[in-house]
Image: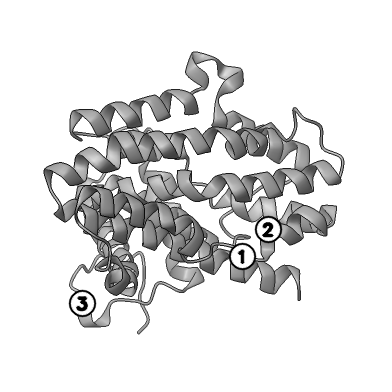
């Protein structure tokens, strides 16, 4: 089914929802997310604005629901008691989709500068901005979880010091690596990961999913970050230039422990249904990552 992403119809039946594994769909969602989340002035044509917004929200939700359906069976296996759920969640570090992918030891030990540059360009273009995702997700959360997300956000903001902010660190590394990430030059798998994270964080119907997705990033990122940092060190980048990956290899370990204790546990204790939603969100994020790693290997290894 061909869909004009700029048409004004919002009457697409669910049975004909577009498949999300598409450059066209993911690039359109990425452009929409970049535009809608940027500070703006009032629209000159609110009718057109809301009609386009409605269609893009439909596409985004269709995409999220496809991801959700893909992981639903495994998510239902997650216990809904507090201790059981946290144990299941922490086990995703070993057993979750994409964990132990051979891409990262190869990046650490074998990839050349051109290959590392391409990898970083894809990752940077697909970066949704952890600080903004946390900020959107924390809205109206219960106190314990809200405070933990606030502490996490404060770390992302360099604790008030611009030189410690994580976003600018990533931008500085892009300059050092000589890359200019663009939507058009990014594989759809990387865009899909960012679009999924943005969709969960900005859609309150997926708020618990977003808590799970953000939590599983903190859980699984340190090992991958350490291997990327090793590769960057091998090709000659300095401690300062590698700082973004070196920092996340260490800091996210503590973030994960705190997240699981201060966010996951209290949320499930109050309402066990949240465990299933957070399990779905975590698995959705990991499945997107798994697809990225496979696509990166296919490209980099020929």
Cα–Cα span, label 3 and label 2: 38 Å
Find residue 214 and report its horizontal and vertical position in percent. 39, 46
| Residue farthest top in this picture | 161
Find residue 265 and report its horizontal and vertical position in percent. 25, 41
Task: Tell me if I can see residue 27 in this picture.
Answer: no
Badge 1 marks a residue whose secondary structure is loop
Residue ID at (67%, 36%) = 246
The residue that label 1 is drawn on is 101
The residue that label 3 is drawn on is 14
Find residue 261 and report its horizontal and vertical position in percent. 32, 36
Q: Earlier in the sequence, mark 3 or mark 1?
A: 3
Give the number of the disc on residue 13: none
The residue that label 2 is drawn on is 104
Task: Tell me if I can see residue 208 in this picture.
Answer: yes
Q: Are marks 1 and 2 in contact (CB under 8 Å)?
A: yes
Residue ID at (28%, 74%) = 73
């Amino acid at each position: 089914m061909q869909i004009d992403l700029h048409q004004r119809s919002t009457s697409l039946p669910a049975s004909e929802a577009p498949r999300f594994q598409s450059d066209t769909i993911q690039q359109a969602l990425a452009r929409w997310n970049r535009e809608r989340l940027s500070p703006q002035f009032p629209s000159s044509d609110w009718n057109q604005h809301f009609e386009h917004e409605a269609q893009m929200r439909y596409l985004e939700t269709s995409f999220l629901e496809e991801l959700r359906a893909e992981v639903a069976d495994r998510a239902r296996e997650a216990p809904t008691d507090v201790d059981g759920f946290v144990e299941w969640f922490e086990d995703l570090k070993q057993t979750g989709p994409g964990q132990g992918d051979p891409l990262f030891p190869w990046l650490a030990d074998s990839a050349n500068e051109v290959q590392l540059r391409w990898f970083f360009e894809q990752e940077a273009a697909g970066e949704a901005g952890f600080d903004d995702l946390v900020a959107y997700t924390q809205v109206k959360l219960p106190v314990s979880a809200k405070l933990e997300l606030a502490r996490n956000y404060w770390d992302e903001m360099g604790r008030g010091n611009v030189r410690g902010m994580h976003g600018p660190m990533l931008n500085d590394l892009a300059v050092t690596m000589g890359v200019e990430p663009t939507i058009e030059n990014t594989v759809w798998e990387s865009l899909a990961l960012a679009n999924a994270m943005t969709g969960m964080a900005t859609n309150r119907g997926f708020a618990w999913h977003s808590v799970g997705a953000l939590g599983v990033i903190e859980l699984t990122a340190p090992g991958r970050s350490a291997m990327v940092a090793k590769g960057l060190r091998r090709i000659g980048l300095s401690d300062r230039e590698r700082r973004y990956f070196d920092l996340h290899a260490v800091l996210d370990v503590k973030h994960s422990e705190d997240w699981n204790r201060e966010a996951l546990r209290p949320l499930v204790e109050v309402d066990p249904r949240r465990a299933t939603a957070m399990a779905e969100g975590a698995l959705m994020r990991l499945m997107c990552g798994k697809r990225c790693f496979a696509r990166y290997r296919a490209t980099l290894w020929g």
